[in-house]
Image (cartoon, rainbow, N blue to C red):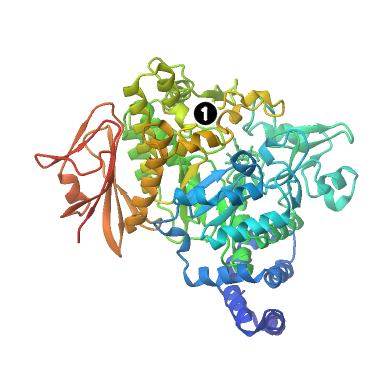
């Protein structure tokens, strides 16, 4: 905060209080951080709440909350904070690879996860994202995204003490823990919602309640539906009171009224408490939806960014080792701002999902043509240096075909037709398709449709194994390895989705659980197959091939410092539309050229690509073929193969 002359006294008092509470050393660090983030905080909160509250007083309360959180932060976490303040690029290192799973589906419960750390270590994992952990409502709960109690771990998974023990065990092994915080909504069973329903005015202001349909109707004129089939509309009628409540997602998920400063303060408290149990990376669920504005789609509003900037500043202040990850699966032009790239840099989230790369990988795979990917990825602004993408091939959600109209037209594709093609291809409805996914979230009004299915089933492994044709199986394995090779090298923390390391196919029994039956995203959330995992060292088996592939990628990435997350990524468009090429550069180390083939046939790439990448004496880092293959000064890429090359100097 910039202290005006009149606030000098308040600043002095605060400084004394901070030093009394934290001691001279940590107190000085806290006050220094306050000086660093103060302007960002005041600016962000003034933009959002300036006309609602006295911002100085509000900020003073929040700084008190941050101080209280810093005071109650356990010593081992403060030690981590200290290390990470010294080593601010700790999450950008080349060896950091993430793993994403449901605790119960992976290992029964949190204790079970703790017993599987060796397995993760084998895959080179340094970051573990556990899907929602907090106590959700009984019955349908959207995979845990309908939280009824932010202070308790879901009893099916264990207790808060188990979470703390797991986090400590992971930290001992050098693994960071990422977990979900559902920001946009609570379950309707959450005590805040109960009190709102009972007419408690302070809590009525926590939600978006409407006495009639006038406003809901006005909003719905421009609001897209997230789950058009499972939960049409964005408002739910409450028979108890005759009111309507805003429910972007399911009818049991009530959106919070973030325009109420008390919601900000309450959720900040939730975030602090959660992180103080040992969570290093907080995944902020549904971040784009926090702010509603009439006449818009109510996503990516400037105020939503300001709220994230405010949360970030306060998190840095209280617990500088904790990172925020935006879950913003939005169109390409809306993505980079979540990392702080606005008209000027404004620190926001440290991490965000590279949804664009994910969509482009699947698009290139289906068309065997990388021109759309090159255009779209080249056009976007890079991630600010202090932040990083998380790159991924599949997650627990459906794939939304986020192809920007502009990008499609630029390479001669009709955007609507291309999106429809991708959905049809991966649902196995297109002639010649190897995809075995399923349609998700068909919107009859717009005909928009998304896709469910595991990576292995979408990339053709399911089809090939059923056909029993070894060359087909080989092709599918190559595709999966090459897709992941891009995920591991393009720039960002790569995330490996549970089961992909064994090539797990769709869960055929997904609909047997009545609580899942209307949501086919469970198709690609199979339980871990530990029998299959037993075969992971047998390279004659599919499981062994995939496991070795993913372990190999992690090891090779760890040997190539230019693959760290804060290296620059430059696309190298090639004359051959089947080959994706890019170079990763970092001032401290030799560049890495990466090539990935999206072709059923061998491809020959002119050796001049090495010059373009700044490589004089090529040295093999990693590849499908296990070496650099040359022919007359040209590089040979096998069908669906990849190659990473660096310079010997
Ligand atoms: C997220 O996804 C979660 O990842 C989903 O599993 C939840 O169902 C949902 O929130 C509600 O909590 O629209 O189709 O841009 O893509 O918030 C999934 C962000 C979703 C949205 C995302 C949301």
State the residue position of label 1. 453
Q: Is residue 103 above or below residue 577?
A: below
Q: Residues within 10 Å of mark 1 (few under 14, many from 20)?
A: many
User: Furthest-left residue in view?
Assistant: 632
Per the image, label 1 sits on a secondary structure element best described as loop
Q: Residue at x 62, y 64 (%)?
A: 315
Whereabouts is ligand 1, in terms of quadrant?
Answer: top right
Rendering coords of residue 362 (x, y %): 41, 32
347 and 501: which is toward the camera: 501
Residue drawn where x is 59% and y is 34% of the image: 527
Q: Tell me: residue 406, above or below residue 39.
A: above
- Looking at the picture, tell me which residue is in the foreground, 471 or 12: 471
Vertical side of 123 occupied by 517: above or below: above
Residue 71 x %, y %: 70, 73
Position of residue 445 measured from the top left corner of the image (x, y, whole percent): 60, 21
Q: In this picture, is 552 found above or below 430?
A: below
Residue 280 visible in the picture? no
Q: State whether label 1 is within 8 Å of ligand 1.
A: no
**In percent of the image, x 40 and y 43: which residue is there?**
550
Nearest the camera: 19 or 219?
19
Horizontal side of residue 389 vs 62, given as left or right: left
* The quarter of the displayed image where residue 413 is located: top left
On-image quarter of the C terminus: bottom left
């Amino acid at each position: 905060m910039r202290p005006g002359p009149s606030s000098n006294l308040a600043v002095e008092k605060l400084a004394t209080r901070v030093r009394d509470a934290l001691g001279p050393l940590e107190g000085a660090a806290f006050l220094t951080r306050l000086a660093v983030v103060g302007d960002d905080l005041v600016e962000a909160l003034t933009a959002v709440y300036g006309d609602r509250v006295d911002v100085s007083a509000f900020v003073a309360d929040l700084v008190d909350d941050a101080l209280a959180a810093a005071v109650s932060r356990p010593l081992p976490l403060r030690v981590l904070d200290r290390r990470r303040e010294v080593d601010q690029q700790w999450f950008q290192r080349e060896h950091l690879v993430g793993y994403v799973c449901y605790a119960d589906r992976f290992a029964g419960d949190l204790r079970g996860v703790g017993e599987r750390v060796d397995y993760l270590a084998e895959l080179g994992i340094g970051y573990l994202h556990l899907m929602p952990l907090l106590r959700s409502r009984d019955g349908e709960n959207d995979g845990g995204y309908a939280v009824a109690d932010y202070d308790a771990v879901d009893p099916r998974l264990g207790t808060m003490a188990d979470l703390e023990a797991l986090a400590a065990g992971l930290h001992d092994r050098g693994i960071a823990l990422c977990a979900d915080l559902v920001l946009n909504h609570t379950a309707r069973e959450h005590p805040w919602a109960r009190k709102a329903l009972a007419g408690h005015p302070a809590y009525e202001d926590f939600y978006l309640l409407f006495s009639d349909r006038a406003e809901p109707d006005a909003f719905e004129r421009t609001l897209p539906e997230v789950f058009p089939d499972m939960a049409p509309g964005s408002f739910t009628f409450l028979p108890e009171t005759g009111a309507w409540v805003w429910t972007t997602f399911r009818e049991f998920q009530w959106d919070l009224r973030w325009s109420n400063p008390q919601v900000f303060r309450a959720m900040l408290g939730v975030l602090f408490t959660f992180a103080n149990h040992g969570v290093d990376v907080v995944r902020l669920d549904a971040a784009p939806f926090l702010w509603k504005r009439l006449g818009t789609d109510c996503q990516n509003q400037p105020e939503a960014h300001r709220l994230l900037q405010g949360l970030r500043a306060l998190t840095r202040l209280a617990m500088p080792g904790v990172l925020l990850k935006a879950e913003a699966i939005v169109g390409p032009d809306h993505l980079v701002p979540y990392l702080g790239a606005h008209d000027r840099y404004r620190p926001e989230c440290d991490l965000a999902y590279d949804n664009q790369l994910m969509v482009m990988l699947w698009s290139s795979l289906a068309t065997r043509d990388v021109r759309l990917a090159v255009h779209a990825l080249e056009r976007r602004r890079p991630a600010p240096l202090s932040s990083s993408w998380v790159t991924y091939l599949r997650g627990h959600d459906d794939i939304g075909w986020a192809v920007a109209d502009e990008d499609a037209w630029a390479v001669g594709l009709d955007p609507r037709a291309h999106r429809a093609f991708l959905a049809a291809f991966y649902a196995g409805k297109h002639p010649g398709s190897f995809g075995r996914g399923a349609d998700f979230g068909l919107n009859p009004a717009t005909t928009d449709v998304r896709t469910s299915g595991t990576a292995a089933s979408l990339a053709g492994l399911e089809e090939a194994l059923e056909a029993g044709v070894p060359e087909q199986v080989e092709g599918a394995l190559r595709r999966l390895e090459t897709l992941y090779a891009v995920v591991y090298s393009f720039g960002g923390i790569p995330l490996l989705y549970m089961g992909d390391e064994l090539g797990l196919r769709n869960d055929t029994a997904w609909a047997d659980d009545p609580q899942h039956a209307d949501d086919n995203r469970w198709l690609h959330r199979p339980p871990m197959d530990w029998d299959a995992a037993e075969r992971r060292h047998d390279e004659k088996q599919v499981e062994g091939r995939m496991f070795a592939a993913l372990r190999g990628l992690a090891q090779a990435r760890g040997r190539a410092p230019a693959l760290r997350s804060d290296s620059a990524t430059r696309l190298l468009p090639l004359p051959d539309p089947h080959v994706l090429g890019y170079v990763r550069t970092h001032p401290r180390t030799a560049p890495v050229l990466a090539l990935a083939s999206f072709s059923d046939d061998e491809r020959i790439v002119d050796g001049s690509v090495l010059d373009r990448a700044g490589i004089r004496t090529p040295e093999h880092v990693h590849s499908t073929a296990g070496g650099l293959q040359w022919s007359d000064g040209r590089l040979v890429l096998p069908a669906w193969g990849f190659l990473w090359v660096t310079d010997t100097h």
